[in-house]
Every structure is written in C-alpha cells, then in structure tokens.
C-alpha cells in the first residue's frame, strides 16, 4: 500500500503537522504557519504553500513555501493584499489565490510571475476549487455568490472581449457566506456542491448551470467532501456532526435530520472545520475546532485513528499519497541547494489585469519634447501588447494541451476498466457453460 500523509494546519501559530495515515507516526512539523480555511495546498507534490492570516487592517498579505524535509519557511511572498484561499493545478505549474477585496490572482509557479488578476466578487473570496480536468475554476465568497470561470477564456483575448461577462455561471442562491466548494468528475459536465452559513448545501449542474438539489441541515456547514462514487456527500457541521446526504435518490425523511440526510458520523466532538478523502475513497479525514484530526471508515462509520494537532482549531486538511522526503534522489537534490521557485510577484504588468473597461493614460510630454515623442512611446506600447497577447495565447494553448492529456489519460483508464469487466464477464459465461455441461452429463449418467 502506497504511504499517505495527513497534513493539518491551524489559524493560530501552531505550525503544520504531518502524520502517516496508516502507522500514525508523526513526521516533520513545519513552523510559523497561521493559515486561513482553504489556505494550505501541496503544489504539484513538490512543496507546501500556505496563505497567512493577518489583521483586518493589514494592506498586504503573505504566502509561505516549505520544502518537504525542512521545518522552517524557505520562501516568503508578499502579494498586494491578504490572500485567503489557495489552489494549485495537479502539475503545480500555477497557483491561484483569492483576495479579501474579491480579486483573484493567478501566478506562474516557476517564475513567480503574476499572469492574471481579475475582480471576481464584491466581497472577500472564501474558497477556490479547480474541476478535475482543471479547465474551470470555481470560487465562493462572503457575498454568498458562487462563480464558475473558464481559465482558457482568461488567456484568450478574443473570446474575453466578445463575452458579455468574464464568468461562465454566477450562482447567487446562497443568502450568507460560502464556506466550502467541491466538484465531481467530468470536467464541465460535473456536479458542483457548495456549502454556506445559511445551513444549506446546494448541488449544481456545471453543464446546464442550474440548481439540482437544495439540502437543509440542522447546523451551519463549514466543510463538505464528495464520495468518489458520487452517491452521497459528507457535510461537517458546527454541531460536531458529519452529516451524510444523498445526491441522487429521492429519500424521504425518516429521522430528525431532514430531507436527503441519511445518517451521521459523530463522537461528541466540537465543530467540524475541514474534510478530505484519502486515496481509497473509503477513509475520510476530519479536522475539528478542538484541535483533533480524526480518520473515519465510511463503511463502518467508526473512527480508526486520531491525531492531535499542537494547539488551537484545525483550519485545513490535505492528504497526499507519498512522503517525498523519503525519496533518496529528492533528498540528495535538496542537500545541494534549494529547488523551490522564487517568490510570487506583488504586482503584474497592467496588461495582465483583466478589467471590464480598458484605458491608458500616458504621462504628459514635457514642453521641450518633440510632439511625436508621445507617439513613439505609444508605438512601443502597442508592440509590447502584441507580445503579451502572443504569450497569453501560448499559455492558453498549453493549458488546452494539458486538459487534452488528462482527458486522454482518463479515457485509457476507462478502456482498461471496461476491458477488465469484459474479461470477467467472459470468464463468468465460460464457467456457467462448463457448469451446465457438467450438470447435464451427470444427469445423463444417472439416467
């Protein structure tokens, strides 16, 4: 069985804890981390990144990097504003952050360059999620809205200019702050789940942009996790219970919880703050306000392991498949020097900021300058714009290629599954025929 790590952080300065999921052994504890909910991410499995909480009056934020085998912060970035949620694509080529102003920032990891920035919500962004093929970004905010963004369109100037608005969909049915978002499989055809402080979880269709189901809970829901089979989802409440809700079946209420809620995972703990599934799709890891991390077997609904964070509530849970610092080749590279990327840019080029109204105000030319000096600067600026547009098109093409590769990989996996099912069915039919022949022969012999 491939080793898995459970990584947990806290909104107070309790560092980041790491435990082996199966043995329970604690690994290296990373220091100096005060991460908000959804603010901790493994970047391509190469290193950890976390946004940091700051005072509400702070005008700038920070994002920290840790390598796997050193406890202290190695890279510090200072974005233009405090960042709440962070998300990274599977390969770790870019990081996306949501700001307290409602802006979304997209950085290239290798260079730290701020590729794009756009105003996404009227209030602070609270959560960010990429769909499974990483072509769509879904954001939730304090204003109760959930919006779906096509990353390909963000880098396609022509499509963006022709669109009436930047987002693909904007859902505003939640009446209070959005606390968590989860997506299923299928890219733009997947289902989308959103949780809110209004006691509801809503299920949306990404292909149709419509609300499919509204589930009302007895408690505020701060965390959700989708069963890999997409039959049920788990919702962590502030009352300490993890509710199990049906996704598809029409379930009538047979308990005190309400429509569609078919059970709970509970052990008299404090509020559930975060949830994450392990690779097998059976073990569910929950973080709690009491600083405990619990591992549940969703089949038996029992706790199989408990980890204790240093102090304070747990704000984030990340489960990764292997401990990279156990790889000798990786460790030897790390001893030779830091391989972490440079800090994230605070400001990008003005052309990288996506706004609804585009305008350029140049500096006034001095009285003794020739009249055509300003026209020369505009000519240079136009050349730079064309160059940036070409770069943007290249990035869009790269993202499209990455999406196609993921689709191809998934298709090959599906073919292998169908092939295995066919072989099993063929073997079953052969066995049935042989058993029938043997039974017939025995009957003839007896007669």
Image (cartoon, rainbow, N blue to C red):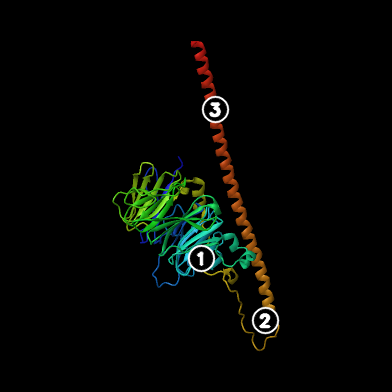
Front one among 190 and 410: 190
Asked if the residues shown at circle 2 and circle 3 are in contact, with their CB atoms under 8 angstroms apart, the answer is no
Q: Report the Cα–Cα distance between label 1 and label 2.
A: 33 Å
Q: Quadrant of the N terminus?
A: top left
**Residue lying furthest bottom:** 367
Circle 1: is it few (<14), some (14-19), or many (20+) Cα within 10 Å? many
**Relative side of 319 to 137, left or right:** left
Q: Position of residue 131 (x, y in %)?
A: 52, 54
Of callouts 2 and 3, the N-terminal one? 2
Q: Is residue 2 visible?
A: yes
What's the mark number on residue 104? 1
User: Residue at 64% across / 63% down in the picture?
Assistant: 391
User: Residue at 56% across / 34% down in the picture?
Assistant: 422
**Relative side of 277 to 187, left or right:** left
What's the mark number on residue 396? none
Of callouts 1 and 2, the N-terminal one? 1
Circle 3: is it few (<14), some (14-19), or many (20+) Cα within 10 Å? few
Front one among 388 and 183: 183
Q: Report the Cα–Cα distance between label 2 and label 3.
A: 82 Å
Front one among 119 and 84: 119
Q: Is residue 122 above or below residue 404?
A: below
Mark 1, mark 3: which one is toward the viewer? 3
Q: Report the Cα–Cα distance between label 1 and label 3.
A: 56 Å
Q: Position of residue 169 (x, y in %)?
A: 53, 62
Circle 2: is it few (<14), some (14-19), or many (20+) Cα within 10 Å? some
Of callouts 1 and 3, the N-terminal one? 1
Q: Is residue 15 visible?
A: no
**Residue lying furthest left:** 268
What's the mark number on residue 429? 3
Q: Which type of secondary structure does the marked residue at label 2 adopt?
A: helix
What's the mark number on residue 374? 2
């Amino acid at each position: 069985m491939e080793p898995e790590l459970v990584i947990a952080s806290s909104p107070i300065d309790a560092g980041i804890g790491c435990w082996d999921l199966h043995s329970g052994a604690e690994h290296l504890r990373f220091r100096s981390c005060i991460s908000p909910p959804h603010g901790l991410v493994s970047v391509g499995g190469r290193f950890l990144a976390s946004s940091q909480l700051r005072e509400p009056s702070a005008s700038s934020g920070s994002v920290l990097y840790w390598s796997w085998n050193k406890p202290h912060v190695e890279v510090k970035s200072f974005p233009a504003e405090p960042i709440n949620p962070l998300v990274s694509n599977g390969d770790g080529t870019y990081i996306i952050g949501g700001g307290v102003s409602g802006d979304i920032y997209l950085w290239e990891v290798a260079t730290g360059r701020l590729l794009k920035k756009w105003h996404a919500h009227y209030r602070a962004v609270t959560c960010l999620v990429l769909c499974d093929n990483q072509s769509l970004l879904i954001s939730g905010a304090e204003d109760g809205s959930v919006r779906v963004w096509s990353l390909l369109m963000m880098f396609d100037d022509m499509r963006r200019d022709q669109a009436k608005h930047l987002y693909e969909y904007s859902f505003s049915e939640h009446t209070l702050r959005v606390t968590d978002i989860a997506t299923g499989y299928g890219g733009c055809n997947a289902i989308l789940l959103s949780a809110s402080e209004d006691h509801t979880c809503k299920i949306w269709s990404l292909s149709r942009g419509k609300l499919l189901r509204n589930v009302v809970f007895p408690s505020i829901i701060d965390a959700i996790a989708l069963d890999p089979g997409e039959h049920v989802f788990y919702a962590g409440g502030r009352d300490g219970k993890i509710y199990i809700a049906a996704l598809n079946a029409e379930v009538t209420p047979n308990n005190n919880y309400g429509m569609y809620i078919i059970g709970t995972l509970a052990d008299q703990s404090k509020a559930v703050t975060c949830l994450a599934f392990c690779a097998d799709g059976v073990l569910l890891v929950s973080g709690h306000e009491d600083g405990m991390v619990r591992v549940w077997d969703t089949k038996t609904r029992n706790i199989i392991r408990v980890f204790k964070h240093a102090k304070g509530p747990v704000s984030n849970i990340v489960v990764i498949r292997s401990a990279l610092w156990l790889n000798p080749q990786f460790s030897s590279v790390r001893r030779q020097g830091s391989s972490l990327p440079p800090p994230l840019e605070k400001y990008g080029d003005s052309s990288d900021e996506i706004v609804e109204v585009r305008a350029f105000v140049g500096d006034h030319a001095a009285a003794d300058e020739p009249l055509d000096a300003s026209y020369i600067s505009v000519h240079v600026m136009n050349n730079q714009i064309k160059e940036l547009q070409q770069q943007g098109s290249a990035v869009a093409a790269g993202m499209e290629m990455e999406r196609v590769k993921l689709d191809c990989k998934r298709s090959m996996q599906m073919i292998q599954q169908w092939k295995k099912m066919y072989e099993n069915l063929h073997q079953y039919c052969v066995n049935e025929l042989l058993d029938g022949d043997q039974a017939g022969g025995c009957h003839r012999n007896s007669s």
